[in-house]
Image (spheres, grey):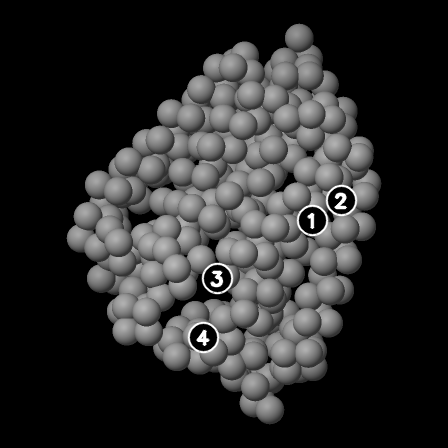
Amino acid sequence: MSDATTRVADSADNWVDSRAPLWSRPYLRLSRLDRPIGSWLLLMPCWWSAALAAGVAHDVSPLPLIVVLFFVGAFAMRGAGCTWNDITDRDLDGRVERTRSRPIPAGQVTVTQAAVFLAVQALAGLVVLLQFNRFAVATGVASLLIVAVYPFMKRITYWPQVVLGLAFSWGALMGFAVMFGRIDTVALVLYAGSIAWVIGYDTIYAHQDAEDDALIGIKSTALLFGDRTRPALALFYGLAVVLIGVALRLAGAHWPAWIGLAVFAAHLVWQIVRIEIGNPGLCLKIFKSNRDAGLLLFAGLLADALLRSAA
């Protein structure tokens, strides 16, 4: 096996490589805890939905616990999803410069060890999910089908980012499922807006691997859009803002939520202006900045929920 001190190519200056016990590092890398940005991005629609649902209910009392459980669940399930992705993509990852140092192709863990670790993470996610009502549990379990098929989509379509959007935006449904035991139109529109957001930011992410992907036959919206990426981002980010705005309108949101959406939109405009698809380092930086964009929107939704709850 490869030395566990060997770092993943696109992950630097993180606590896993510098402070985690050597035996744990390959597993923490499998779960992407050396670069948790994906967990944050999975979490954002969960928090948006929870805050918006609390505003609709005029009751923020359940929100602190829901926020904490969503946080734990997002990190556990994103880790499980990434481990599954690495298992299915182990041969492809070995042919791409940025991913060949991941634990499985680098020989730091076996496929069997990774599968056991996948089961442990999924069990942790299930424990979190079981804290909610039966409808929310069923809703959460339903997402697993999308997670399972996602790694195979880049082999057959230039739109794998759509499937990723379906998976990473699932939390937009979960807040309403947890709060109300149902999925309202508001949640469905929020879900659609989040999908458009994911397509945009993952297109930016995919530009890091565009050359290698083209050589080995992997498909992505980055390759599909190419030099037209900036107008494509404008389309999908614009659609995200409009749909989230419709969700806010349907939910009867007040001014703090609209300020949050406006700042979120301004951040997305900055990304579109700043993007240089030939600069992988900048693409990664802009991709990671979406956590901040999501937190800005969440702050507005949370302030709105607090305002409405106090009224």
Give, as a three-letter code, the residue at label 3.
Answer: Phe
Where, by quadrant of the figure, is residue 215 drawn? bottom left
Callout 4–callout 2 Cβ contact below 8 Å: no
Label 4 vs label 2: CA separation?
A: 31 Å
Which numbered mark, 1 or 4, is in the foreground of this view?
4
Left or right of 266: which side holds 136?
Answer: right
Give, as a three-letter code, the residue at label 2.
Answer: Leu
Give the residue number, with chain letter if any, for mark 1: 73
Give the residue number, with chain letter if any, for mark 2: 129
- Compared with 131, 205 (above or below) is below
The tag earlier along the polypeptide, 1 or 3, is 1
The tag earlier along the polypeptide, 3 or 4, is 4
**The disc label shown at residue 152, or none:** 3
**The disc label shown at residue 93, or none:** 4
Q: Position of residue 74 (x, y in %)?
A: 64, 49
Q: Residue at x 45, y 26 (%)?
A: 244
Q: Residue at x 54, y 12 (%)?
A: 252
Callout 1–callout 2 Cβ contact below 8 Å: yes
Let me know if residue 17 appears in the view. Answer: yes
Which numbered mark, 3 or 4, is in the foreground of this view?
3
The tag earlier along the polypeptide, 1 or 2, is 1
Q: Position of residue 59 (x, y in %)?
A: 72, 18
The tag earlier along the polypeptide, 4 or 2, is 4
- Counting other residues with Cα less than 10 Å from the Cα at mark 1, is it few (<14), some (14-19), or many (20 or more)? many
The tag earlier along the polypeptide, 2 or 3, is 2
Is the N terminus in the top left, top right, bottom left or bottom right quadrant? Answer: bottom right
